[in-house]
Image (spheres, helix red, strand yellow):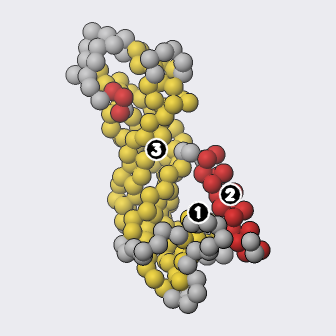
Amino acid sequence: MNKLTKILVVFLLVFNFCLLQCDSVSAVENTSNELSTSNFITYDKEGDLVSMSMPEDYSEMSSYHSITTLLSSGYKSWYDNGYHPSTSVWRRVDHYYFNTSSTVNVGVSFTITYGTVSGTLAVSNTTSTNFGYSISVDQNRDSKVRVYTDFNWKYYRADVYDNYTGEYQYTYYFSTIQITAERFVPVYR
């Protein structure tokens, strides 16, 4: 393995480790054009590595890289994510139990000036045992649980270039979303 390939492998390992440690961050890519390869390296304007996708044979370098530009960012509070996926039917129960170590995804999608910020957030999942925390509800009425979240979001443009010729290839947009709070509110009918 040459020195450049070794450096790229180290970056990939660090990046994957960060993804495993930061499971509450999601990124969604909105591709306007696609090349035949899914291998890429992404740098910010300062030249720092943001992300990459390398082939299984790490001795082969990506043919493309992208330069990202932050277009917009913000914070949402009490965003309505809809009903909790585990409470999709009306029930008569006295408690809902939630476990923070078990998660389920809820959707996020809203329009900004530059496009649509969309993705998923991992929130606590229900459990049949008393591990985690519970929400008391009126057992004489049908209920579901509505999910509300707070999160930071960023929306980026990525311009893709050929590593060998330096020629511009295409642009895609993506968003990152990081949850800061989750709220579960009982709803009755």
Which residue corresponds to mark 3?
121
Q: Secondary structure at mark 3?
A: strand
96 relative to 171, above or below: above
Q: Nearer the viewer, mark 3 or mark 2?
A: 2
Kindly report the distance in space between the C-alpha atoms of the residues bearing marks 1 and 2: 13 Å
Q: Residue at x 74, y 68 (%)?
A: 6
As drawn, is 47 to the left or to the right of 132? right
Q: Quick one: quadrant of the N terminus? A: bottom right
Amino acid type indicated by mark 2: Leu
Q: Nearer the viewer, mark 3 or mark 1?
A: 1
85 relative to 175, above or below: above
Residue 137 is tagged as none
Q: Residue at x 37, y 75 (%)?
A: 33
Amino acid type indicated by mark 1: Glu
Residue 13 is tagged as 2
Residue 56 is tagged as 1
